[in-house]
């Protein structure tokens, strides 16, 4: 791919170096989204790009979440890149080490690792209107890029609970996404705060090993059975010789999961069988009526993420486990006190309390025209055009940004849809000789209205729960509220009419309506 800008010689800045490295595209992050973007750029023959990665390896959330029991709740045939099927998945639902190994192998196979700058945490990214470049400051030096792609992810920055005394705790404390594997919890009194997707994987994994596990539940989750099984060696051989078979299974899994959208976003009655399945699962696994009642949600299934597990309920019902539903009043140096006055001694505190999703920390660091940050522009809620671009932020593309999240299927499908959109935008810039491409505010408003309209009547807004899917104003700014194939259709190619393009030849500061 040829650039519409004059390239300056690239220099790899070492940490602390003052040289600014000029690249065509800078991508923030090297998780599923960042790697997909890098692979697409390579596929198009682009070599002038970097993936700025704050850690020392690729993988994003799958690199960071190493807690015991970490696994995916979407089948691997579907939770993988469409262009890089893996016939060797060892289980139908793979565990974190296999997914991380897959991402590492894919980065190497597609030659993306060489574009990664590790240890490069983005501390600021500022649009320079005169130079028509993004100036990106990282902990590994400065970069100037014509195009900035944020693939920083939504499950990247942990949320810590605001509980009085948390900082005074003298035992071991860790967030689920920052697991300290050097600490041995064998024989300890362990507390787990939270009952989301992470907690329900951690609790059964540690329960047999610890003296006691206390689960602090604020809201119970709907849990359905996990149909996980090892993939037999003969099946793996078959996938290798018949890749079409794996593709067909992927297609079937995708189609089956899309049916959930019918219940979540269209007609609530389609969720009834799923609710009945979850109820029967609970009744089968928990005999104690009091415990069962405490574990029964009072909101419609699907309002929060539907969890899948065969061993969470048995672990909570085990003799060395306790489910606490009274709120936490205070944390003391060696104990946790609940509002009913009960104090429980605690050696290790695990916070499975989620992530900053509606208040993405990266949004504070990216400043567009006039120096306004994405966080300032998003003060009233995250807005975008096609979940990918924001008015006032020229040549910036967001992957896994607003309204791309899905609770029922594979995020990788959404990521690939977005990457295709960015790819077409870059193609358009090149074909038209544009130095700047910026979405129009009215396109953003239209997308916001479309999301609001599609969100009406969905289980996420009307299911009777509080969830991180909604922002502080109660708006759905995180989930795609429709079938995912509709998102793909809307992002298949650039909606050129919704963009202003500035030709490379135009004097700086000139804006030309498309
Ligand atoms: O986080 P969460 P997570 N006091 O935000 C509770 C993905 N994921 O890490 O429900 C007490 O879902 C909070 O309570 P409540 C997946 O997309 C995927 O588990 O707000 N409790 C909740 O129970 C998932 O959705 C996999 O009332 C407090 C929990 O902490 C996303 O990651 C595996 C509290 C947070 O749940 C996040 O999941 C794991 C407080 N102050 C994760 N603050 C796969 O398998 C919060 N809580 C693919």
Image: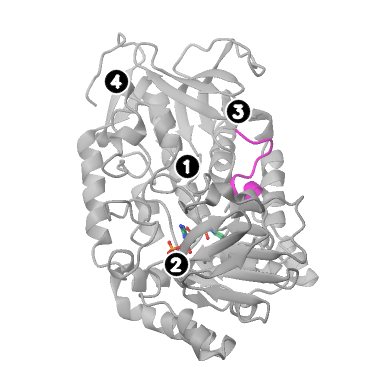
- CA distance separating discs 3 and 1: 22 Å
Q: Is residue 93 left or right of residue 291?
A: right
Circle 3: element type: loop
User: Which one is earlier in the sequence, the residue at label 1 or at label 4?
Assistant: 4
On the image, numbered disc 4 is attached to which residue? 370
**Position in image of residue 200 (x %, y %):** 58, 68
Q: Find residue 120 and name its label.
A: 3
Circle 2: element type: loop
Q: Is residue 236 left or right of residue 460?
A: right
On the image, numbered disc 1 is attached to which residue? 419
Q: Is residue 180 above or below residue 190?
A: above
Q: Nearer the viewer, mark 3 or mark 1?
A: 3
- CA distance separating discs 2 and 3: 43 Å
**Position in image of residue 409 (x %, y %):** 48, 63
Q: Quadrant of residue 265?
A: bottom left
- For disc 3, the neighbor class at 10 Å (few under 14, some 14 to 19, many from 20) is many
Q: Quadrant of residue 513?
A: top left
On the image, numbered disc 2 is attached to which residue? 339
């Amino acid at each position: 791919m040829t650039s519409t800008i004059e390239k300056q010689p690239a220099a790899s800045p070492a940490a602390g170096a003052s040289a600014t490295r000029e690249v065509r595209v800078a991508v923030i992050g090297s998780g599923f989204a960042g790697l997909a973007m890098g692979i697409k750029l390579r596929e198009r023959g682009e070599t002038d790009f970097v993936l700025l990665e704050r850690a020392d390896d690729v993988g994003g959330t799958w690199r960071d979440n190493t807690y015991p029991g970490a696994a995916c709740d979407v089948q691997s045939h579907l939770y993988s890149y469409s262009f890089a099927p893996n016939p060797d998945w060892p289980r139908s639902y793979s565990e974190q080490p296999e997914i991380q190994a897959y991402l590492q192998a894919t980065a190497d196979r597609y030659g993306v690792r060489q574009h990664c700058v590790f240890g490069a945490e983005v501390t600021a990214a500022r649009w320079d209107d005169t130079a028509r470049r993004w100036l990106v400051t990282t902990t590994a030096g400065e970069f100037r890029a014509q195009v900035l792609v944020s693939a920083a992810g939504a499950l990247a920055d942990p949320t810590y609970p605001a509980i009085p005394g948390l900082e005074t705790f003298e035992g071991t404390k860790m967030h689920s996404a920052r697991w300290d594997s050097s600490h041995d919890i064998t024989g300890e009194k362990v507390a787990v705060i939270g009952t989301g997707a992470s907690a329900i994987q951690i609790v059964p994994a540690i329960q047999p090993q610890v003296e006691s596990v206390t689960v602090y539940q604020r809201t119970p989750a709907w849990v359905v059975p996990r149909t996980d099984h090892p993939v037999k060696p003969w099946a793996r051989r078959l996938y290798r010789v018949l890749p079409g078979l794996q593709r067909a299974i992927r297609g079937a899994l995708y189609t089956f999961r899309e049916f959930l959208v019918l219940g979540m976003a269209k007609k609530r009655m389609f969720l009834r069988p799923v609710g009945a399945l979850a109820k029967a699962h609970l009744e089968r696994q928990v005999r104690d009526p009091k415990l069962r009642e405490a574990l029964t949600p009072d909101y419609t299934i699907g309002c929060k993420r539907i969890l899948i597990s065969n061993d969470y309920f048995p672990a909570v019902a085990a003799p060395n486990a306790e489910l606490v539903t009274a709120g936490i009043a205070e944390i003391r140096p060696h104990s946790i006190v609940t509002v009913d006055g009960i104090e429980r001694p605690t050696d290790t505190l695990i916070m499975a309390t989620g992530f900053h999703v509606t208040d993405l920390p990266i949004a504070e660091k990216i400043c567009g025209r006039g120096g306004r940050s994405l966080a300032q522009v998003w003060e009233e809620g995250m807005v975008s055009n096609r979940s990918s671009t924001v008015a006032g932020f020229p040549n910036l593309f967001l992957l896994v940004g607003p309204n791309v999240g899905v609770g029922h299927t594979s995020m990788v499908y959404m990521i690939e849809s977005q990457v295709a959109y960015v790819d077409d935008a870059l193609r358009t810039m090149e074909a038209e000789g544009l130095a700047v491409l910026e979405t129009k505010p009215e396109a953003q408003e239209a997308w916001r209205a479309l999301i609001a309209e599609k969100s009406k009547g969905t289980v996420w807004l009307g299911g009777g729960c509080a969830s991180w899917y909604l922002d502080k104003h109660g708006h759905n700014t995180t989930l795609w509220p429709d079938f995912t194939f509709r998102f793909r259709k809307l992002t298949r190619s650039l909606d050129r009419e919704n963009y202003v393009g500035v030709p490379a030849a135009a004097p700086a500061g000139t804006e030309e309506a498309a």
